[in-house]
């Protein structure tokens, strides 16, 4: 009975249980900001990662979506089953004159636990894996160097994967800015908010001015 109660509690506050697949899905689209640079990260539920980055100066937009799989199966109902190759990911559009990729990497490794394999807290499955989708060779080299630099900060080995980005597919509209739209949601309060606040505390000098 205790095991059943534990599972029920995890589902109550899991990223997967909060989505509504009956809501209308927007067409997959690419956001093109000509003068900005782009980074793509996966670190568990995309609501947490998106909101962690959007509070940072120099981040113009953070978009929730899917990476690591094909366009045809880039659908929340399929991805959340864990049977596609996708990870819930966030595409970060940033101004390189304000913030650099190395700082984004530091934020990424603060916003989630890179030592957990195929899970983040209550969210379990390969779709919640830790992964850096690099856009070019420079990003790959910077990410490899940053992982080596930060490895001593963690008691367990970093298991973050690294892959060349083949495609990013924007998630359904109701996933975008989820934390901002639903601040009192149980998952947001209990899972997302502590991660967002952890980033805000560490990078307090880089927060956007209200």
Image: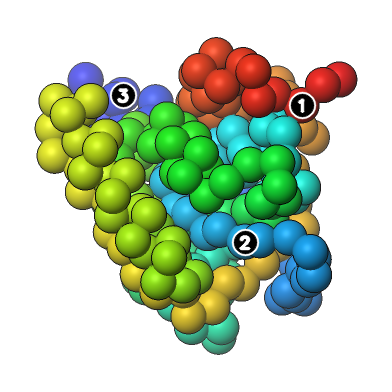
Q: Residues within 10 Å of mark 3 (few under 14, many from 20)?
A: few
In this image, 157 relative to 85: left or right?
A: left
> Which callout, 3 or 2, points to the residue nearer the camera?
2
- Depicted 47 relative to depicted 110: above or below: below
The answer to which of marks 1 and 2 sits earlier in the sequence is 2
Q: Nearer the viewer, residue 21 or 184?
A: 184
Residue visible at 66% across and 51% down in the picture: 96
Mark 3 element type: helix
Q: What residue sits right under mark 1 in the picture? A: 208
Where residue 85 sits, quadrant-wise, is bottom left
How many numbered discs, if any? 3
Horizontal and vertical percent for residue 122? 36, 34
Q: Nearer the viewer, residue 50 or 9?
A: 50
Q: What colouring style does the render use?
A: rainbow
Residue 38 badge: 2
Q: Residue furthest front?
A: 97
Work out which quarter of the rendered image holds the C terminus and state it: top right
Horizontal and vertical percent for residue 44? 43, 45
> Which callout, 1 or 3, points to the residue nearer the camera?
1
Residue visible at 23% across and 25% down in the picture: 153
Horizontal and vertical percent for residue 127? 39, 58
The answer to which of marks 3 and 2 sits earlier in the sequence is 3
Q: What residue sits right under mark 3 in the picture? A: 5
């Amino acid at each position: 009975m205790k095991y059943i109660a534990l599972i029920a509690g995890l589902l109550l506050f899991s990223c997967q249980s909060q989505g509504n697949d009956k809501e209308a899905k927007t067409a997959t689209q690419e956001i093109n900001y000509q003068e900005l640079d782009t980074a793509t990260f996966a670190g568990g539920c995309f609501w947490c990662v998106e909101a962690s980055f959007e509070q940072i100066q120099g981040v113009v937009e953070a978009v929730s979506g899917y990476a690591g799989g094909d366009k045809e199966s880039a659908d929340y109902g399929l991805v959340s089953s864990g049977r596609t190759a996708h990870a819930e990911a966030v595409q970060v559009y940033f101004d390189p004159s304000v913030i650099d990729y190395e700082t984004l990497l530091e934020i990424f490794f603060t916003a989630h636990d890179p030592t957990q394999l195929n899970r983040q807290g209550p969210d379990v499955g390969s779709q919640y894996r830790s992964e850096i989708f690099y856009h070019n060779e420079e990003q790959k080299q910077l990410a490899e160097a940053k992982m080596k630099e930060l490895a001593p900060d963690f008691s367990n080995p970093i298991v973050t994967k690294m892959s060349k980005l083949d495609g990013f597919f924007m998630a359904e509209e109701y996933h975008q800015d989820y934390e901002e739209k639903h601040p009192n949601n149980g998952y947001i309060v209990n899972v997302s908010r502590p991660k967002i606040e952890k980033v805000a505390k560490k990078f307090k000098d880089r927060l956007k001015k209200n």
